[in-house]
Image (cartoon, rainbow, N blue to C red):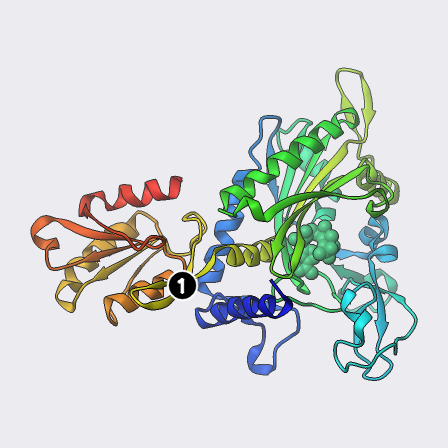
Amino acid sequence: MNIQESANSLEKIVALCKRRGFVYQSAEIYGGLNGVYDFGHLGSLIKSNLRQTWIESLQNPYGCVVMFEGALLGPEAVWKASGHVDHFSDPMVDCLNCKRRFRADDPDIAKGCPACGKKDSWTPVRQFNMMFKTEVGAAADGSSIAYLRPETAQSIFINFKNVLSTTRVKIPFGIAQIGKAFRNEITPKQFLFRMREFEQMEMEWFCKGEMALEYFEFWCAHRLNFYRMIGINMNNIRQRPHEKDELAHYSTCCTDVEYKFPFGWKEMEGIAHRGAFDLTQHSTHSGKDLSVFDEETKTSYIPTVVECSVGTDRTFLMVLFDAYDEDVVEGETRVVLRLAPRIAPIKAAILPLTKKQTEAAMCLYADIKKLGYQIEFDESGSIGKRYRRQDEIGTPVCFTYDFDSDNDGSVTARDRDTTKQERIGIDQVPAYIKKMLEK
Ligand code: ATP
């Protein structure tokens, strides 16, 4: 795919998201805020399905994974200890002509300024810290400095002892968190790929140092299940172990899960062997003992951490790219999102063929809704138009209540991907949906 095609396909995804209310530019009526987005009904439903699947994907044979939800604001001391105040920066250059800023490692800038086109007109490279700094409370002294978290992990590390002493977990175990992170990215781009406010799903796995490499390998293999569960074509997924010079100084090994976007292979998730760095740092800086006692050896040690960290919004974008398709049905081009049923925002649509069937179809709708499924009822427009509407939001099946339904107690189940129709008993509809979601 060339650059033009890649831009076209991104444009199509953005247009679909806007048209169907998956995603909106944040503060759009005020001109928007760059790198910040809001999610509408269908977008929120997809995200919630992704979160649920991610939690399920953490099931493993070795230990519990408990949930956690930390604060978004953290005092400066946390970010000093974690190294973010001193090191969480990207190299930046300014265009001397138009004054716009870019990442110095962005390959596009070699050709000239992406904004004004001027060549070789850059300031020297300098480091730009990506954390959002703020002050908490009314006192404007150093003690009030706080930062919006640039990753969710640190709140897990600083609560490690709280979790250990209040849950019945034993090493090895994991602490998982889904929540917002904030990075003042120099150049947010590619829609949801690089945002300034985004969501992460992170799991920190605490284990003994001598077992960490084995667990690291286990998690690298195990994490691929998540991508299978959300229905990604596995030919578009690969793992890329980091080269030695890419590793943080405390990390022994790290592997990225990458997805083949039209704009290249890109990181979706980082799986990292972080050693005992994080807990050691927080132990030293806070003066609190974060070691655990080993009953077997009767000694204390600081656990080693294996981290799995994936962005929810980036996953959302990947899911849309992977599912987006256009084909010709009955001489008309349709947009179809071939989403895995468990990720689809709407699981089924109930459609009366004509207004005469509205009442009976409404009863079926109410019965299915009671079971807790997200479903839609649609009676406006031709049946073909209604199918297309559901196709482009990824609804896996439409049940059409037609002229024969009253007599034969059946509806037509129309499959999104094949457009094939089959007749099924009305009493079979719940089982049909259940089976579809188990796939
Ligand atoms: P990148 O190299 O793309 O900036 P990173 O290596 O800095 O990513 P991590 O700090 O490892 O990313 O964060 C873990 C995950 O969080 C990433 O794999 C990605 O899915 C997500 N993520 C990170 N930064 C952003 C962002 N600005 N917008 C959306 N998602 C992000």
> How far from the left and from the top, in percent, is residue 251?
82, 40
Of all residues, the one furthest to the right in this rendering is 124
* Residue drawn at the location 81% of the way across and 31% of the way down: 302
Residue 420 appears left or right of 423: right
Picture quadrant where residue 10 is located: bottom right
> How far from the left and from the top, in percent, is residue 126?
90, 67
In the depicted structure, whether residue 37 falls above or below residue 258: below
Which quadrant is the C terminus positioned in? Answer: top left
* Residue drawn at the location 63% of the way across and 34% of the way down: 221
Q: Which residue does the numbered mark 1 point to in the structure image? A: 392
Please name whichever residue, 152 or 233, is drawn nearer the observer in this view of the structure: 233
Ligand 1 falls in quadrant: bottom right
Q: Amino acid at mark 1?
A: Glu
> How far from the left and from the top, in percent, is residue 365?
24, 56
Picture quadrant where residue 29 is located: bottom right
Which quadrant is the N terminus positioned in? Answer: bottom right
In the depicted structure, whether residue 270 falls above or below residue 142: above
